Image (spheres, rainbow, N blue to C red):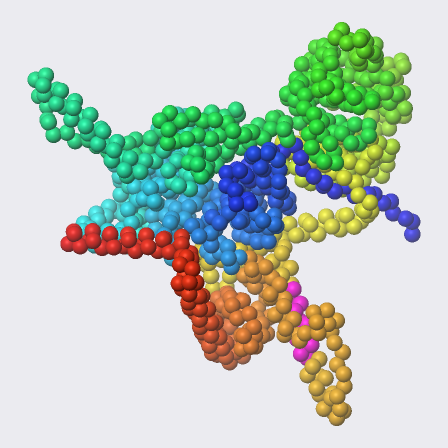
C-alpha cells in the first residue's frame, strides 16, 4: 500500500481589526467594582470587553461558531448573558471569562435578553416568535410563552409582579401572567412593528416605539390594588358575526384585547404620545437604571434624550403653569374681556416627560447604553456603524446640558471594509487598506503599529526592503508611503480608471499594474532626489504599456518572470510572454461563476473544473513554492486546494460575511483574510498532519450532527404541541447524553446479571470465587454499577437534562425508576433524582400506569419521595432558622444591619401596603 500524501492543517489563530459587530448591542459591565468604565461589545462569535479610559481590550469571552446577536448583564454585575444566531444562550462569568451555562431552546436568532430584578430568571425572545423564561440558578428552562406571530423585539419583567410584557414585529404588545404562563392582555394600538418598549414611573407607565416618529405612552393600573375602592361597572360585550368578544376601542381608535376577561390583572390605557424628531423607525429604545432618563434613536446618528420628571417636579411645573394662567386671566378681565376667572390647567404627557437634548455622533448609531455615574452625570456609550465606539457624558440636571465626547476607541480597526491585504517579506508585518486609511499590524501581537491616510485602496504590496508600501486606488492613482515616518511620498496618476491589481516582479526591480482603462503598465523602481532633503527617495517610472480590448481585473507574474497572466472583464485570462508581450496560453482562475478552473499552459486545455464555493470566488492565492492554493468566496468560507491532484484539502470557517481579500505569507505559515463583517483573521499552519480520508470522515460526522440538530422536536407523550412546559430543543449534546445514560443502564444490567450468575457459581462450588471487575467501574474508583449510573446522571448539564430524558427509549425507564427508588432511599442527590423522576412520570404517564410490573415501584417511590423531600425541607428550614439566629446575634453584638437593601425593600413594601389600606378605608 502506497503512502498517502499528508498536508499540514491550518487553524484559526486570532481575530483583530474589529471593535464591535453590528448585529448585537453594546452594554456597560461592572469589572473590579467600577461602573461606567468597561463596555461589552459583540465581535462576530466572541464578546470583547473594552476599557473606555485606556482604549484597550482587556477580556475576550470566546464563542464557538455562531455570531453574537444580543447581550445582557446580570443585575449583580458578575455575569453576562450572550445570545447567538442559532438561538442558544450562554452565561459568562465576568471574573473568569468562562461560559459554563448554555441554554438551547430557540430555533432562530436571539433578539432580546432580560434578567428579572433579582437575576434569578432570564427571559429570551427570538426570531422564532417564542419567549422562554430560564431558571439561571437551576440552569434549566421554566416555560415557553407562545403567542407572537413574528419576531419578538423586547421582553421585560415587571418589578414586584410575576408578570412579563413583550413586543414583536407583529405590531402586538402582550402581557403574560407567569403564574399561569398565558397571555392575559394584548395591546393592538400600533399599526406598524413595535421595535422597543420600556417601563418607567415604578412600573406604572409603559412607553413603546414603533416604525413611525411617535413614542406612545400607556398608563398601567393594577386592579388588585384598587379592586375594593369601587364596584366596577358591568362590562359591555360586543358580539360580531364572527363571534369575537370582549374588544374595547379606546380613544385613539386603537384596540385593546383582553384574552381572559374573567381574570384581568391590570388595565393599560393610552396616556398620550411623544413626537420624535427622527422620521424613520425606532431602532433602540432604552431607559437608565434609575428610570429617569429615556433615550431612543433611529437609523441616523442622533440620540434623542428625554427626562421623566418626578412628582415634585411635575407639581412645581403645574403650579408655575397655573400661576401663569391665572395671571393671564386676570389681565384679560382688567381689559374688560369676558372670561372665566376659574382657571383649569390640564396635565399633559409633555409636562411629565420633557425633551433634554439630542446627542449627535460621528456616524450612524447601531446600539447604545446608558448609565448614571456616582457624580450624577449621565454617560451614554455608542456602537457606531463604522466600527467605532464613542462615549458621551452630560449633566441632565443643568438648565442647558451640553454633551461632551469623553472617550473614543478607534485605533484598533478600519472605518470601512478592508479591500486589500499584504504580508511583508519577513512574515512579521501585515498591511491592510480600506477606503480612507492604511494600517500596519504586528502579526504576533496583533497591535496596530502605524496608521496612514490614503484614497480608496484596491490593491497593495510591500516594496522590497519593507520600508515603503505601494497602494493602488479606485481613482487610478498609485501611492507610495513611507513606513518609518507615515508620510505619503508620491502620488502618480497611473490609470484613467480604477487600478484593480498590481503584481511585484520576481526579480523585485519593478511591478506591473492593471486598470479599468483597458491597459497593463510596467513600472521600474528608481531613486530620485528629494526636494525637501539632500537624500534620495524611492520613486517609480513607467517603462512599457500593453493596450487590451477589455478592462483588466487582475495581473500576475509567473514565478520565473517569463509569463504574465492578465484576467479581463470578458471572463478570459490571457497569458503573455514578458519579453515580447505576445499571447501565450489560457490558464486557470477563480470566477464569479463559483468555479475554479485549472488549465494547461502548453495547449490551453482545461485540466480540471472545480466547484469551489457557493457564491462568487473573490480571491485566489498560491502558497509560495508549492502547488497548493487558497480561495475565498462570498459564501464566508476559505478553502485550500491541491492543484496537482485537484483535491479539496480543508475549509476554514469563521467569517460571517463576504470575504474580500486574502494574503499568504512568504513562508506559507500564515494566512490573513478580511471580510465585510469588519474583522481581520489570522490562520496559522500547524505541525499537525491532515489526512484527507480522516477529514472527509469528520466532515460527514459534522453533517450528521447538523442534520440531527435540525430534526423536529420529538413529541412528548401526553403533551400537546402548544404546551408551554417544554423549553429545550434537541442538540447533538443532548443525544450524546441520552446515549451515555443508555450505556450506563446497559452496563448496570450486565453487571447485575454477572453478579447473580457469580452467586450461583459460588453457591454450587461451596467457596468464594473472585469476580472480575469491569474496567469502566475500576476507572471510577471501583464503584458499584448503580453508583456508576448515578455518576452519569450527575455529569449531565442541568440545561440538557430534560431533553436527554425526553429522547430516552421507554425500555430503559423501568430500570431507571428502580434505581431512583434506591438512590432516594439512601438520600443520594434527592433534588436531582426528584427532578428526573417527575419529568419521566410526566412524559411517560400512560405507559407507566398501564404497566402492572411498575405499580409496586411507583408505590415505593411515592412513600420514599414524600418522606425524603420532607426531610430535605426540614433541613433547609432548620438552616434558614439558624442563619436568621446568627444574623440577629451579629446585629446585637456589632449593631450593624445585615442585608440592609433587602430589609429596606421589605419596609418599603409594608409602607405601601399600609398606605393602600388607609386609602381603601377612606373610600369606604
Q: Does residue 730 appear left or right of residue 229 in this picture?
A: right
- Work out whether residue 223 or residue 634 is closer to the camera in this orientation and state it: 223
Furthest residue toward top: 531
Residue at left 16%, top 51%?
A: 923
Q: Quadrant of residue 501?
A: top right
Give residue 552's position: percent from left, percent from top. 74, 17
Q: Quadrant of residue 813?
A: bottom right
Q: Is residue 335 above or below residue 441?
A: above
Residue at left 87%, top 32%?
A: 625
Give residue 688's position: percent from left, percent from top. 81, 47
Q: Quadrant of residue 375?
A: top left
- Work out whether residue 45 or residue 734 is closer to the camera in this orientation and state it: 45
Q: Does residue 750 appear left or right of residue 197 in this picture?
A: right
Verify whether residue 748 appears in magenta: yes
Residue at left 51%, top 57%?
A: 137
Give residue 509's position: percent from left, percent from top. 86, 17
Verify whether residue 609 appears in magenta: no
Furthest residue toward right: 1
Q: Is residue 820 above or below residue 271?
A: below
Q: Which residues are magenta?
A: 740-753
- Work out whether residue 914 or residue 353 is closer to the camera in this orientation and state it: 914
- Work out whether residue 274 or residue 32 is closer to the camera in this orientation and state it: 32
Viewer can see residue 751: yes
Q: Does residue 828 appear left or right of residue 157 in this picture?
A: right
Residue at left 49%, top 49%?
A: 76
Viewer can see residue 552: no
Q: Pick the quarter of the image with the C terminus.
A: bottom left
Q: Does residue 822 appear left or right of residue 748 in this picture?
A: left
Look at the magenta stretch and give its main secondary structure.
helix
How many dots with numbers? 0
Give residue 865's position: percent from left, percent from top. 48, 74
Amino acid at each position: 500500500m502506497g503512502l498517502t500524501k499528508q498536508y499540514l492543517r491550518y487553524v484559526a489563530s486570532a481575530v483583530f481589526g474589529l471593535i464591535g459587530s453590528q448585529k448585537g448591542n453594546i452594554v456597560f459591565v461592572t469589572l473590579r467594582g467600577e461602573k461606567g468604565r468597561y463596555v461589552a461589545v459583540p465581535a462576530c462569535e466572541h464578546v470583547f470587553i473594552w476599557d473606555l479610559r485606556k482604549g484597550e481590550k482587556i477580556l475576550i469571552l470566546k464563542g464557538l461558531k455562531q455570531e453574537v446577536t444580543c447581550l445582557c448583564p446580570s443585575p449583580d454585575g458578575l455575569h453576562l448573558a450572550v445570545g447567538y444566531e442559532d438561538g442558544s444562550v450562554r452565561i459568562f462569568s465576568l471574573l473568569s471569562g468562562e461560559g459554563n451555562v448554555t441554554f438551547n431552546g430557540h430555533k432562530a436568532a436571539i433578539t432580546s435578553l432580560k434578567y428579572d430584578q433579582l437575576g434569578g430568571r432570564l427571559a429570551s425572545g427570538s426570531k422564532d416568535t417564542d419567549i422562554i423564561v430560564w431558571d439561571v440558578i437551576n440552569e434549566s428552562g421554566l416555560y415557553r410563552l407562545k403567542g407572537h406571530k413574528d419576531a419578538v423585539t423586547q421582553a421585560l419583567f415587571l418589578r414586584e409582579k410575576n408578570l412579563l410584557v413583550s413586543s414583536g414585529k407583529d405590531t402586538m404588545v402582550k402581557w403574560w401572567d407567569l403564574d399561569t404562563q398565558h397571555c392575559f392582555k394584548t395591546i393592538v394600538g400600533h399599526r406598524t412593528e413595535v421595535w422597543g418598549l420600556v417601563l418607567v414611573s415604578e412600573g406604572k407607565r409603559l412607553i413603546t416605539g414603533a416604525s413611525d416618529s411617535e413614542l406612545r405612552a400607556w398608563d398601567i393600573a393594577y386592579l388588585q390594588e384598587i379592586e375594593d375602592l369601587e364596584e366596577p361597572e358591568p362590562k359591555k360585550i360586543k358580539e360580531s358575526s364572527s363571534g369575537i368578544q370582549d374588544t374595547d376601542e379606546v380613544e385613539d381608535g386603537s384596540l385593546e384585547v383582553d384574552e381572559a376577561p374573567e381574570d384581568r390583572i391590570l388595565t393599560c390605557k393610552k396616556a398620550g404620545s411623544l413626537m420624535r424628531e427622527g422620521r424613520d423607525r425606532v431602532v433602540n429604545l432604552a431607559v437608565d437604571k434609575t428610570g429617569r432618563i429615556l433615550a431612543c434613536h433611529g437609523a441616523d446618528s442622533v440620540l434623542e434624550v428625554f427626562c421623566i420628571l418626578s412628582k415634585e417636579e411635575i407639581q412645581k411645573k403645574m403650579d408655575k403653569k397655573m400661576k401663569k394662567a391665572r395671571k393671564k386671566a386676570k389681565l384679560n378681565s382688567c381689559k374688560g374681556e369676558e372670561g372665566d376667572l376659574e382657571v383649569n390647567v390640564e396635565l399633559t404627557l409633555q409636562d411629565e416627560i420633557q425633551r433634554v437634548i439630542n446627542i449627535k455622533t460621528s456616524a450612524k448609531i447601531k446600539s447604545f447604553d446608558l448609565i448614571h455615574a456616582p457624580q450624577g452625570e449621565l454617560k451614554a456609550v455608542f456602537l457606531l456603524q463604522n466600527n467605532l465606539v464613542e462615549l458621551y457624558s452630560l449633566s441632565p440636571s443643568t438648565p442647558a446640558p451640553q454633551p461632551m465626547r469623553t472617550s473614543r476607541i478607534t485605533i484598533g480597526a478600519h472605518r470601512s471594509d478592508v479591500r486589500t491585504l499584504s504580508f511583508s517579506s519577513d512574515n512579521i508585518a501585515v498591511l491592510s487598506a480600506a477606503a480612507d486609511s492604511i494600517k500596519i499590524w504586528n502579526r504576533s501581537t496583533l497591535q496596530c503599529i502605524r496608521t496612514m491616510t490614503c484614497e480608496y485602496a484596491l490593491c497593495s504590496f510591500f516594496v522590497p526592503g519593507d520600508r515603503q508600501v505601494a497602494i493602488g486606488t479606485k481613482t487610478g492613482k498609485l501611492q507610495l508611503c513611507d513606513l518609518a515616518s507615515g508620510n505619503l511620498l508620491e502620488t502618480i496618476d497611473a490609470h484613467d480608471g480604477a487600478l484593480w491589481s498590481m503584481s511585484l516582479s520576481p526579480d523585485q526591480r519593478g511591478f506591473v499594474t492593471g486598470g479599468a482603462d483597458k491597459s497593463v503598465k510596467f513600472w521600474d523602481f528608481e531613486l530620485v532626489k528629494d526636494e525637501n532633503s539632500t537624500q534620495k527617495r524611492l520613486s517609480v517610472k513607467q517603462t512599457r504599456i500593453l493596450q487590451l480590448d477589455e478592462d483588466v481585473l487582475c495581473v500576475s507574474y509567473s514565478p520565473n518572470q517569463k509569463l504574465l497572466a492578465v484576467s479581463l472583464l470578458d471572463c478570459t485570462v490571457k497569458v503573455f510572454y514578458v519579453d515580447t508581450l505576445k499571447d501565450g496560453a489560457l490558464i486557470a482562475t477563480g470566477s464569479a461563476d463559483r468555479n475554479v478552473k485549472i488549465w494547461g499552459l502548453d495547449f490551453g486545455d482545461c485540466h480540471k473544473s472545480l466547484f469551489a464555493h457557493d457564491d462568487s470566488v473573490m480571491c485566489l492565492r498560491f502558497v509560495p513554492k508549492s502547488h497548493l492554493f487558497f480561495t475565498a468566496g462570498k459564501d464566508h468560507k476559505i478553502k485550500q486546494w491541491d492543484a496537482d491532484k485537484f483535491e479539496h484539502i480543508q475549509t476554514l470557517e469563521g467569517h460571517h460575511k463576504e470575504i474580500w481579500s486574502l494574503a499568504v505569507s512568504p513562508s506559507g505559515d500564515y494566512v490573513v483574510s478580511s471580510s465585510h463583517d469588519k474583522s481581520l483573521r489570522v490562520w496559522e499552519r500547524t505541525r499537525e498532519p491532515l489526512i484527507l480520508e480522516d477529514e472527509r470522515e469528520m466532515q460527514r460526522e459534522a453533517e450528521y450532527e447538523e442534520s440531527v440538530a435540525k430534526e423536529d422536536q420529538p413529541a412528548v407523550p401526553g403533551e400537546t404541541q402548544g404546551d408551554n412546559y417544554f423549553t429545550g430543543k434537541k442538540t447533538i449534546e443532548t443525544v450524546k447524553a441520552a446515549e451515555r445514560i443508555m450505556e450506563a443502564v446497559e452496563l448496570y444490567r450486565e453487571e447485575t446479571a454477572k453478579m447473580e450468575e457469580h452467586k450461583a457459581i459460588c453457591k454450587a462450588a461451596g467457596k468464594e470465587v473472585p469476580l472480575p471487575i469491569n474496567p469502566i467501574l475500576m476507572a471510577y474508583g471501583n464503584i458499584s454499577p448503580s453508583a456508576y449510573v448515578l455518576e452519569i446522571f450527575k455529569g449531565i448539564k442541568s440545561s440538557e437534562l430534560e431533553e436527554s430524558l425526553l429522547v430516552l427509549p421507554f425500555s430503559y425507564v423501568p430500570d431507571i425508576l428502580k434505581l431512583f427508588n434506591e438512590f432516594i432511599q439512601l438520600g443520594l442527590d434527592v433534588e436531582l433524582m426528584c427532578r428526573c423522576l417527575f419529568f419521566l412520570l410526566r412524559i411517560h404517564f400512560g405507559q407507566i400506569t398501564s404497566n402492572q410490573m411498575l405499580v409496586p415501584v411507583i408505590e415505593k417511590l411515592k412513600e420514599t419521595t414524600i418522606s425524603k423531600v420532607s426531610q430535605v425541607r426540614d433541613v433547609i428550614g432548620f438552616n434558614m432558622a439558624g442563619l436568621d439566629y446568627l444574623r440577629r446575634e451579629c446585629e446585637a453584638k456589632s449593631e450593624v444591619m445585615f442585608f440592609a437593601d433587602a430589609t429596606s425593600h421589605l419596609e418599603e413594601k409594608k409602607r405601601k401596603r399600609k398606605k393602600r389600606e388607609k386609602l381603601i378605608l377612606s373610600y369606604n
